[in-house]
Amino acid sequence: MSFRKAYARTFGPLLSAFSKRRKRDTYNPKREAITAPDIPTVYTIYDYNEGKCERIATDQLVHCMPHTHDTHNTWINVDGLRKEEVERLCANFGIHPLLTEDILSTGQRAKADDMDSHLFCLLPMLTYNQDTGLIHTEQLSIVLGDNYVISFQPDPKQDPFDPLREKLRNDLAPVRKKTVDYLAYCLIDAVVDDYFTVLEKLSDRLEKLEDEVVIKPNSAVLLKITLLRQEIMVVKRAISPVRELVNSFWHSDNELIREINHKYFKDIYDHISLAIEYTENYREVAINLQDLYMNQVNTRMNEVMKILTVVTTLLAPATVIGGIFGMNFDIIPFQHHHHGFIIAVVSMLSISVLMLLLFRKKGWF
């Protein structure tokens, strides 16, 4: 057997095992955009008044036609944004092409438009991903007409409207007795209330990170703080324009919003203002956490440097004494004494102990 083969069989695996670096756990999730252009369009129609409520779920546009009477209110929720079907639906209800274009253009800033015969708004719905800790945004578009509300969302997986659906099935619910602009209020209010659920998740993460920073600060904790700051900024950028949107509905003079219902939009305005205040506070807390992390790291480094300095200082007398006794001169005391080594060692230890007691007395460590 050659030397190379023997080396490969014996020392090769051993050296490769030592040379391999252990992979550290990282916290670097990736954000996945919510886009659903190919999802089949589903229309969920709630046709209701104070006496009854009918629900129809269909993929046929023929069921989504405006009523010729005003004794019923209608909510049409559209899941999926296929261009041809959205354009046909908007054409059936006489919705302006500019609004249709806004509905199909996802990822926009929250805004509101008044087209006389229609009131339009789009705002983000936020979803917290428990696995990755990321905030996903989905655009919700709402069109308010004379006796109907049409809502558009690209992804049918989840929305915050389940409590509203339960209320529509309840004969005693206020939404069954009020006009359709109150239904629009309920939709916007459900989205804004869901913001607080996301903010609560971010608050829990801030509390856990604060404990980690205090107990064991490391580079992984710093990465978590950085990512959390990014998510807070995602929420802030998403919900800040919503306040202006709600304010425009609150002060709108369009007849589609009855004066008696203006107070409800004022309530949403208060809620969104509070949510924005929370995001600003969370951002400041995240910045303070990053500063706390840096202070903790610097404090630990100072502690290590202090210990090393104390050790070096305590060893300095032993170094000096050892250096003196190592000189080749006959005039050095105890150099030829048979107890000279013991005397030198005792001197080194005694001076180090005395220095240690002096340091403790002065409170230097």
Image: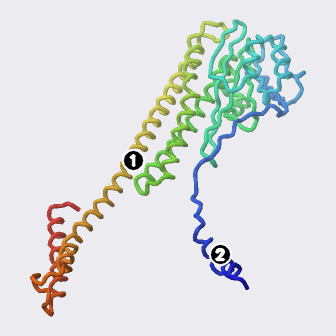
Residue 193, horizontal then vertical, whole percent = 58, 32
In the displayed structure, would residue 358 be above or below residue 256? below
Residue 208's disc is: none
Kind of residue sitting beneath label 2: Pro
Q: Can you give x and y, in whole percent of width and height, for residue 133 in the image?
A: 60, 45
Residue closest to the eye, 199 or 333: 333
Quarter of the image where the N terminus is located? bottom right
Reading the image, the residue beneath label 1 is 294
- Specify few, some or many for label 1: CA neighbours under 10 Å numbering under 14, 14-19, or 20 or more: some
Between 68 and 129, which is closer to the camera in this rendering? 129
Residue 45 horizontal/vertical position (percent): 80, 26
Pinpoint residue 12: horizontal percent, then vertical percent.
65, 75
Using residue 126 as the reference point, say whether residue 317 is left or right of it.
Answer: left
State whether residue 106 appears in this view. Answer: yes
Which residue is rendered at x = 69% and y = 34% of the image?
159
Left or right: residue 9 versus residue 287 is: right
Q: Secondary structure at mark 1?
A: helix
Relative to 18, 53 lies left or right: right
- Quadrant where the C terminus sits is bottom left
Q: Is residue 14 above or below residue 39?
A: below
| Residue located at (36% from left, 48% from top) | 295
Disc 1 residue type? Met
Most distant residue in the bottom direction = 338
Residue 330 in the figure: left or right of residue 262: left
Query: Could you say which quadrant of the image residue 89 lies in?
Result: top right
Judging depth in this view, the residue of 116 and 134 nearest the camera is 134
Say whether residue 53 is visible: no
Label 2 or label 1, whichever comes before in sequence order: 2
Mark 2 vs mark 1, CA separation in Å: 41 Å
- What residue did someone put label 2 on? 13
Circle 2: element type: helix
